[in-house]
Amino acid sequence: MTFKDLEYFAILAKEKHFGQASVQAGVSQPALSIQIKKMEAELGVCLFERSNRQVVLSPEGEVLLERAQKILRQVEDFQTCARQFKDPYQGQLILGAFPTLAPYLFPQIIDELHQSYPEMKFFIKEEKTETLLKMLKEGKVDAAFIALPHEDSTLDSEFIFSEEFLFATPANYPEDFPNELSLQSLKGRELMLLDEGHCFRDQALELCSVNQARENFDFRASSLETLRHMVAAGLGVTLIPKCAQDESAKIKYMKFSDPSPKREIALFWRKTSPKAEIFREIADDLRDLFKKS
């Protein structure tokens, strides 16, 4: 069995179709079919259940796929590490962030990264935190921006920046507020929040619980942009991270007095990553960038 066999196995498992998988693998469909059959014969295991329209993994194939993907990631890490010895500042980096951060963070930092690391190509992924951490561990992203606290013995991290939460109301909200609110001002209020799975929702719920506020169950948003539009339409109030503050005349943003609620963002990567030192350098550069802003 060869490394190529494992690649074919993983591609077919993903595509679930010999024609599509053969295009992805860069071989003819008959050649791919022959290699998979040879692999099954060598292992003595049926990896796929076949029909005229598609192929699906057998129960045995499901178990073996996880191990095959692990081997493929290790080989990729091996090759990456070898390239790093030649020039650690070439190649590509895939950076991830969660949806309430990615659209606001990446436009701020991507030019800085290109200037500091001109020979590197940067690609970005936006996913919810749980998915992002899974992708990070599977090697599908090289590093990810995650809200603290987060503990994982397989990951290293560096703090990057913190940002305040703002209280957002419609501009014509009937109640007058001071320029800076105390957290006690949240008491008894209903706040519009994000859907399940967003770490910013969890942070907002914690603030609501501590300060006797509650969620507005009539509405949940899938994004911060939707939340802002709902506030602008006069349908309620919410919390917004400072990075998402806009210049809309229809929304009034208010700061909280100290100690103000905030979130802390760190860059995480696998401890085994051959790019670990580069991530530490990137973290240093970004900390300096946010100190200046």
Image: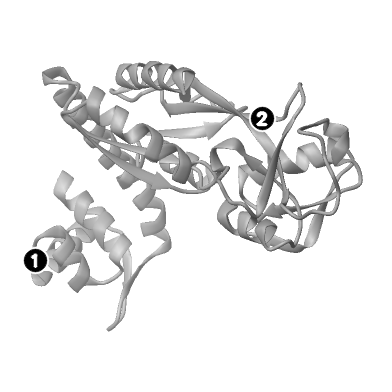
Tell me which label, 1 or 2, sits earlier in the chain: 1
Residue at 36%, 18% in the rendered image: 285
Where's residue 105, x and y in %? 45, 37
Where is residue 287, by image quadrant? top left
Residue at 62%, 50% in the rendered image: 197
Compared across the picture, whether 214 is left or right of 18 comes to: right
Q: Identify which residue, 132 or 113, lies in the foreground.
A: 113
Residue at 14%, 66% in the rendered image: 23
Q: Identify which residue, 194 or 269, lies in the foreground.
A: 194
Is residue 277 placed above or below 194 in the rendered structure? above
Compared across the picture, whether 89 is left or right of 58 comes to: left
Compared across the picture, whether 31 is left or right of 279 comes to: left
Amino acid carrying mark 2 in the image: Lys
- From the image, state whether disc 1 or disc 2 is nearer to you: 2
Give the distance between the C-alpha atoms of the residues marked 1 and 2, in whole angstroms.
56 Å
Q: Residue furthest bottom?
A: 52
Where is residue 75, by image quadrant? top left
- Residue under pointer 1: 31
Density class for disc 1 (Cα within 10 Å; few <14, some 14-19, many ≥20) is few
Amino acid carrying mark 1 in the image: Ala
Where's residue 113, x and y in %? 29, 29
Is residue 34 placed above or below 262 in the rendered structure? below
Residue at 29%, 82% in the rendered image: 53
Where is residue 181, by image quadrant? top right
Is residue 226 placed above or below 126 in the rendered structure? below
**Secondary structure found at label 2:** strand
Q: Residue 262 carries which label?
A: 2
